[in-house]
Image (cartoon, coloured by chain):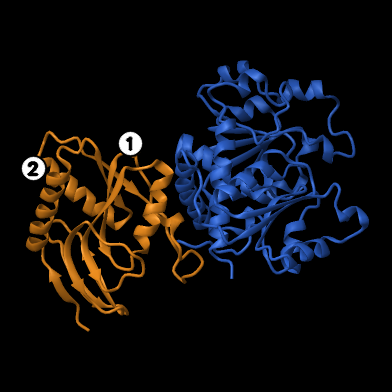
């Protein structure tokens, strides 16, 4: 297979296993490119991409922009603060105005779940979801799976644990879809109040005891508590959360095998993981960031080849 | 049109021997020269030539690399065909070296144009030479000519030159494009 089955990247849900493999294969090539002295290729020099960020972002925004520049695309950036959104313009109007300026591709982050799916149905352009509320964050899941595969090989039948705020995390949902499509077994772990009731419909195991969950896992993805998305209290105190679900060096050392520690960032050091763990050999957090650029180059390259 | 055999394995062997000796003659022990096969098909040829040079001159210091030009092509989004990337592996510096680019068939010259751009990411070579097994002359779209050439072939635009690399049974055929 040498072509994606989709014309937009709205979520991992819409991709098939071959798509994931093609993206990874292409990312291998781009990873080699970004480690050259001159990190640029001219592939997308006649493609214009708009980055629409309706929500804060550091890593994802920088990573997308670097990826675009290394592909030689023209880039325009938009963030909702200081824009006409505050004057009452709708999302469709905003995007159509941007498209009128002959933009070929839209990368969008939005606080509302489903925003990118909604947009793809209402405007005629290629849409890449850079995170939509609590729904999906497909490029993050792709770079997570790619980074993990780089460390431990084929993910088939591997056990992967996702810990923390499963309810509010788009990374969790995209991760579950991506790992499952690659044949891995998923366990989610966290306070009951932060695990959605209907999670079992996704064919994942639920475990509220963190230490027990860690025992038979190959890799653990530690998520951040998404305070900004919480309108009520989900657990008694941060201190109690840290005691039950914080990953420390002691816990890691007490395990039978050496597991891989992942984190999508931003890290709250001392909450979900200690500094010692974050900076340890077992953590691949910075590899994830490096691979993020290669993965996003691959996604945009493959989608651009399908532009009309 | 029935595929027409242009070269058989014996002829190819003779040509490759000649090309290898030409390279040895011009580049001595290859201290200042590197060989770069253009992926995917030039890679086979460059490996064969590098092996031959090793057998003729076991003391040589020839370095061999492979260059993928996919992301430098000028037909991205302009052809129905999906461009599939191969891997680049250049484990040495090309700064101030003589680079011999190797490809199996020189046709329009566009792949070589892309390769010339692509190698710029790895440094500034002292000079770039081109070696091809087949030169389809009269079909060039860019001003590019080989420095080392196996065989010149006269062909129509709707024909295709197919090089088959098979153990002990290499061959080159001329076929019509729609086959």
Badge 2, how many Cα within 10 Å: few under 14, some, many 20+? some
For the C terminus of chain A, the image quarter is bottom right
Q: Report which colour depicts chain A.
A: blue
Q: Report which colour depicts chain B.
A: orange
| Viewer can see residue A68 | yes
The reply, left or right, for residue A263 in relation to residue A116 is: left
Percent x, y of residue A134: 76, 47
Badge 1, how many Cα within 10 Å: few under 14, some, many 20+? few
Residue A11 sits in which quadrant? Answer: bottom right
- Residue B92: mark in rendering: 1
Q: What is the chain identity of the residue bearing mark 1? A: B
| Viewer can see residue A1 | no
Percent x, y of residue A270: 72, 21
Percent x, y of residue B12: 12, 60
Q: Earlier in the sequence, mark 2 or mark 1?
A: 2
Reading the image, the residue beneath label 2 is: B56
Q: What is the chain identity of the residue bearing mark 2? A: B
Residue lying at 17% horizontally and 49% vertically, measured from the top left: B49
Tell me whether circle 2 and circle 1 mark residues in contact (CB < 8 Å): no
The reply, left or right, for residue B126 in relation to residue A45 is: left
């Amino acid at each position: 297979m040498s072509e994606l089955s989709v014309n937009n990247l709205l979520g991992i849900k819409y991709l098939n296993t071959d798509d994931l493999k093609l993206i990874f294969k292409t990312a291998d090539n781009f990873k080699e490119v970004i480690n050259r002295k001159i990190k640029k290729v001219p592939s997308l020099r006649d493609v214009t991409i708009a980055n629409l960020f309706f929500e804060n972002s550091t890593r994802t925004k920088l990573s997308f922009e670097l990826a675009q520049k290394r592909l030689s695309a023209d880039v325009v950036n938009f963030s909702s603060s200081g824009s006409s959104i505050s004057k009452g313009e709708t999302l469709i109007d905003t995007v159509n105005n941007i498209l009128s300026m002959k933009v070929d591709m839209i990368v969008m982050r939005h606080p509302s779940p489903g925003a990118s799916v909604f947009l793809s149905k209402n405007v005629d352009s290629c849409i890449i979801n850079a995170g939509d509320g609590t729904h999906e964050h497909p490029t993050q899941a792709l770079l997570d799976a790619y980074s993990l595969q780089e460390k431990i090989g084929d993910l088939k039948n591997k056990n992967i644990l996702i810990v923390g705020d499963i309810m509010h995390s788009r990374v969790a949902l995209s991760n579950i879809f991506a790992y499952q499509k690659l044949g891995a077994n998923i366990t989610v772990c966290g306070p009951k109040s932060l695990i959605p009731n209907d999670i079992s419909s996704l064919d994942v195991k639920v475990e509220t005891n963190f230490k027990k969950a860690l025992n038979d896992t190959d890799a653990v993805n530690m998520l951040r508590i998404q305070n900004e998305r919480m309108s009520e209290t989900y657990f008694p105190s941060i201190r109690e959360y840290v005691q039950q679900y914080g990953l420390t060096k002691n816990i890691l050392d007490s395990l039978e095998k050496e597991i891989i520690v992942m984190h999508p960032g931003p890290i709250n050091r001392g909450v979900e993981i200690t500094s010692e763990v974050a900076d340890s050999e077992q953590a691949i957090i910075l590899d994830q960031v490096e691979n993020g650029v290669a993965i996003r180059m691959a996604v945009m390259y493959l989608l651009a080849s399908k532009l009309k | 049109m029935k595929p027409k055999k242009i070269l058989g394995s014996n002829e190819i062997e003779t040509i490759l021997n000649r090309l290898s000796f030409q390279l040895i003659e011009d580049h001595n022990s290859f201290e200042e020269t590197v060989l770069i096969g253009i992926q995917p098909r030039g890679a086979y040829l460059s490996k064969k030539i590098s092996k031959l040079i090793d057998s003729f001159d076991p003391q040589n210091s020839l370095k061999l690399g492979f260059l993928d030009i996919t992301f430098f092509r000028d037909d991205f989004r302009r052809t129905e065909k999906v461009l599939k990337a191969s891997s680049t592996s250049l484990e040495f510096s090309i700064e101030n070296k003589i680079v011999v680019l190797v490809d199996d068939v020189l046709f329009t010259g566009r792949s070589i144009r892309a390769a010339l751009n692509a190698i710029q990411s790895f440094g500034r070579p002292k000079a770039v030479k081109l070696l091809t097994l087949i030169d389809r002359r009269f079909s060039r779209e860019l001003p590019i000519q080989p420095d080392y050439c196996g065989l010149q072939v006269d062909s129509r635009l709707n024909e295709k030159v197919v090089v088959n690399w098979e153990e002990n049974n290499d061959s080159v055929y001329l076929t019509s494009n729609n086959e």
